[in-house]
Image (cartoon, grey):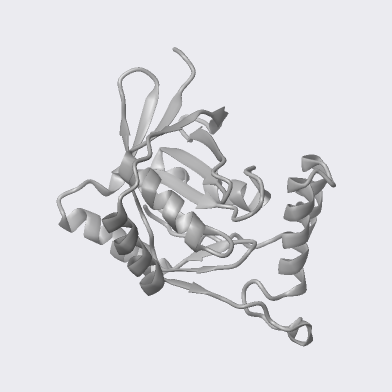
Amino acid sequence: MGRPTIYLSIKAYQKMRAWTEMAKGEVSWLGTVEGMEGDGFLIEDIYLLKQICTDAGTSLDDSAIGEFLTGITKKGDDPSRVKAWLHSHGHLKTFWSQTDEKTIDRMSSAGYLISVVTNKDGEMLGRIDIFSPFHVHVSDVPVNVFHEPDDALMSALSQEFREKVTEQAPMPKSFSSSRFPGNTDTDRLVEQLEEDVSLGKISLEEYERRIAELDLEPFWPQREEW
């Protein structure tokens, strides 16, 4: 068995690049996966769901996830093919944060999960998690794409982005006690830690230790079934 590879269809890649550029900070997607001959996995398409985004995280709308999976079924597709989670770190480097690790753990009902993190510089980092019979993952999985500009697709993606994504403006410091996502002192500390580790100011071990001490709630809403 050779080293696995993650592939994105041209359509999936174009969507990912377009929405990454449109977002001010983080943004995330779900994707359908098809196994390929050999050791490859193809992300055939990705889907933008309603979500709240900040510079440091993205929270998908729980009801939107249910509607999306129901819609997949009504179209005659198999919702169990939704085995990809992709997200952008905005201007930060590509790495797996503590929040990312918790999100992946909470998708264990998928059997296996293909994950990709990207950023505005076009960097991509892939991993494959297999949850049964026990949890193992393969990191630094190559991500191969083929890109061909499509003006009509870009226009449609821009419209869908405006309809579904609500981006919150930074709150004044006087509102530091606000409980809104992305505006608490803890959220700002997480943002600073992620910037520090991406710039090499602190080690990944130091970052993970300090994040663990905060005992953060995951951005991904918990669901009993996928």
- Residue furthest out toward the top: 1
Residue 151 sits above or below residue 205 on the image? below
What residue is rendered at 45% in x and 38% in y?
A: 114
What residue is rendered at 74% in x and 68% in y?
A: 188
| Quadrant, the N terminus | top left
Residue 175 sits above or below residue 93 on the image? below
What residue is rendered at 80% in x and 43% in y?
A: 200
Q: Position of residue 156 (x, y in %)?
A: 29, 63
Residue 84 sits above or below residue 146 on the image? below
Q: Position of residue 89 (x, y in %)?
A: 60, 53
Q: As rendered, which of 170 and 21 lies closer to the eye?
A: 21
Residue 128 sits above or below residue 203 on the image? above
Q: Position of residue 145 (x, y in %)?
A: 41, 34
Q: Is residue 185 visible?
A: yes
Q: As rendered, which of 58 and 222 lies closer to the eye?
A: 58
Query: How many circles with numbers are drawn on the protein?
Result: 0
Q: Is residue 44 visible?
A: no
- In the picture provided, is 32 more to the left or to the right than 26? left
Q: Position of residue 204 (x, y in %)?
A: 77, 41
